[in-house]
C-alpha cells in the first residue's frame, strides 16, 4: 500500500485567497493524475498557486507540424490549460474558456516550452489571464485568455 496523497480537482478550490502553492508532492500527484489533452500533449505543472500557474511542455515529435515547428494549436491549448487552471484556483470554482487569443512570436523546434499564467482582471463572472510562453529564454507566444466562472456548478 502506498502513501500517495489523494487529490481531487475540487481541492484546488481551497487555494483561493490563501496565497499558497501546492507543494512538490502534491504537484507530482496532480501531474500523475491528469488526463485528456494535458496528458496527450505532455503538460507538466510546476507551480499551482493562488493567482499563478506554471507548466512545462517538452517539445516532442507529436507536437510538430510538417515543417518541423511546434504547431500553433499547441500554444493555444497550453495557454487554455494553464490559464483555466489558474482561473479555477483564483475563483474557487470551475471555469471555462470563452475566448483565447494567441500571438505566435517565434518558432520553436525543440527544447521545453515554459508557460506562466498571471491575472489581468479577476471578476466575479469573468477573468482575464495573460499566458506567456518561453523557450530557451525567449518569448515565443503570448495568449490572452478570458474565462467564465461557473458558480453553483
Image (cartoon, rainbow, N blue to C red):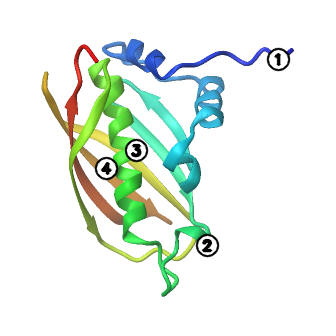
Task: Kindly identify the residue that appears in the image at 33 percent across and 38 percent down.
Answer: 84
Residue where numbered disc 2 is placed: 61
Q: Disc 4 vs disc 3: which is toward the camera?
A: 3
Count of numbered labels shown in the rendering:
4
Task: Kindly identify the residue that appears in the image at 52 percent across and 77 percent down.
Answer: 109
Residue 131 is marked as 4
Could you say where residue 38 lies in the image, as x and y percent from the top left? 51, 47
- Quick one: label 1 or label 4, which is nearer the N terminus? 1
Outermost residue, bottom side = 67
Assign a secondary structure to mark 2.
helix
Question: Residue 32's quadrant in the figure?
Answer: top right
Assign a secondary structure to mark 4.
strand
Task: Judge from the rendering whether residue 26 lies leftward or rightward of residue 109; answer left or right.
Answer: right
Marks 1 and 3 sit apart, C-alpha to C-alpha, by 29 Å
Count residues near mark 2 (Cα–Cα under 10 Å), then give few for <14, some for 14-19, many for 20+: few
- Quick one: label 1 or label 3, which is nearer the N terminus? 1
Marks 1 and 4 sit apart, C-alpha to C-alpha, by 36 Å
Instruction: Identify the image quadrant of the C terminus.
Output: top left
**Are dots 2 and 4 in contact, CB under 8 Å?**
no
Amino acid at each position: 500500500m502506498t502513501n500517495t496523497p489523494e487529490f481531487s480537482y475540487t481541492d484546488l478550490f481551497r487555494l483561493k485567497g490563501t496565497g499558497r502553492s501546492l507543494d512538490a508532492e502534491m504537484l507530482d500527484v496532480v501531474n500523475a493524475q491528469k488526463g485528456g489533452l494535458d496528458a496527450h500533449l505532455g503538460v507538466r505543472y510546476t507551480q499551482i498557486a493562488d493567482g499563478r500557474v506554471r507548466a512545462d511542455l517538452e517539445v516532442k515529435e507529436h507536437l510538430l507540424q510538417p515543417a518541423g515547428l511546434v504547431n500553433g494549436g499547441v500554444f493555444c491549448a497550453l495557454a487554455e490549460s494553464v490559464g483555466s487552471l489558474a482561473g479555477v484556483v483564483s475563483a474557487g470554482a470551475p471555469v471555462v474558456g470563452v475566448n483565447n487569443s494567441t500571438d505566435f512570436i517565434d518558432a520553436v523546434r525543440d527544447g521545453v516550452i515554459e508557460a506562466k499564467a498571471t491575472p489581468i482582471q479577476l471578476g466575479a463572472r469573468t477573468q482575464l489571464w495573460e499566458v506567456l510562453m518561453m523557450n530557451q529564454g525567449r518569448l515565443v507566444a503570448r495568449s490572452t485568455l478570458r474565462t467564465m466562472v461557473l458558480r453553483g456548478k
